[in-house]
Amino acid sequence: MDVILDVKFNEFAREYAERERGYPNTLNDMADAAREMCWAGFGMVDDGTGEPLEDWQACYYYNCDCQENLRKVNAEVTHAAFKSAGVETFEWRGWIVWDASNQAGHEIARSIGNGLAHYPILDDERLSEIEWDNACEMIADLYTLPEGVEPDDLIRIMPEVPHCSNCSSCDVEDAMETLGYLQCQDCNAWLKTAIEGAMCHECTEREQEGECECVPAYVHTLKHVGAYATMGDIREIQRGCETCYPVRWPHGGAKLGI
C-alpha cells in the first residue's frame, strides 16, 4: 500500500476500487494515472447510479443519440464545473477523473453525484439545444430542401423535436405540407403546390413524345404562371395533340381513359 500514500483519493474513487475487487491493485492503477498527469490526487464522480460518470468524446460514439446526448451534456457540465473551480479533469478508461488533491473538487463531485441521483441530466436547456442541432443536421442530411426553407423552419412546426435519429420519427413531409409544399410524383423534388400527384417541370418535360412541342409549350406556360401539372393533365394535353395522340394511343385507348 505504500505506493499510493502520496496520492489522495476521494471517497467515491476508493469505494469504487473496493467494489471492483481490485483493491489495492485498482488503487495502484489510479495512483499511477494520477502521477502520469502530475496530480497529487485521483477523484471520480458518481453518475447517480453508483457507477463512475462517463466522459464523452466523438471517438467513443457507439450508442444512439438518446444515450449519447445525455453523456455529452453531463460530461460538458461536469468538466465546466471543475474548470471553473480551478480543478483539473481528465478522461481515464472512459470516465471523468479529477485531481482530488484540490479540496474544491470534493464538493463539486458530491454535488454532481447527488444531482444525478435525483435527475439524470445536469442541464435540460443544453440537452434541448443539442437535440435541436442534431435534428437540423438529420433533416439536412436526409432531405434536399427548397430554397428559402431551413431545417429550423420545419422543426418549429413539428409537434416535438426529433431528438434521436434512431428512436424518433421525423415528420418532414407533414411539416413541408403545412408550409405549402408537396413532393414531385416522380423525383420527390419539393414543389410549392397543394395539388396531389403534381410533377416538377423537368419530369413533366420528360413526357414529351418524340419531337412534338405540345408538352414543352405546356411546361413553358406552367413556369410562367408558377404552376405544376399532374400526369392526368399531361395526358389530356397529348389527347388533344394531333401528333401525340396516334403515337401514344395507336388503338384509340385515350377514348377509354387509358
Image: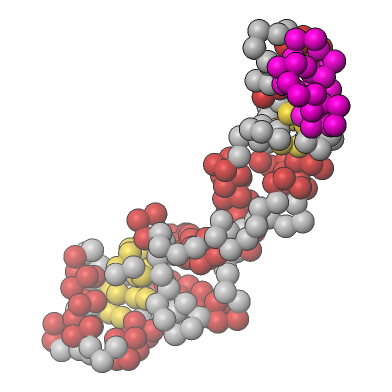
Q: Is residue 189 above or below residue 111?
A: above
- Tell me where residue 247 appears, x and y as whole percent: 71, 17
Q: Position of residue 160 (x, y in %)?
A: 72, 57
Viewer-nearest residue: 103 or 33: 33
Q: Quadrant of residue 179?
A: top right
Q: Is residue 257 magenta?
A: yes
Residue sticking out furthest to the front:
251
> Which residue does the image show at 33% across and 63% down from the upper left?
90
- Quadrant housing the C terminus: top right
Residue 125 shown left or right of residue 43 in the figure? right
In this rendering, does residue 128 appear at all?
Answer: no
- Residue placed at 23% from the left, 83% from the top? 27
- Report which quarter residue 199 is drawn in: top right
Q: Main secondary structure of the magenta part?
A: helix
Q: Is residue 241 above or below residue 109?
A: above
Pick the residue in front: 249 or 6. 249
> Residue 83, image x and y in percent?
43, 59
Q: Position of residue 41 (x, y in %)?
A: 28, 74
Can residue 206 be found in the magenta stretch? Answer: no
Q: Is residue 44 visible?
A: yes
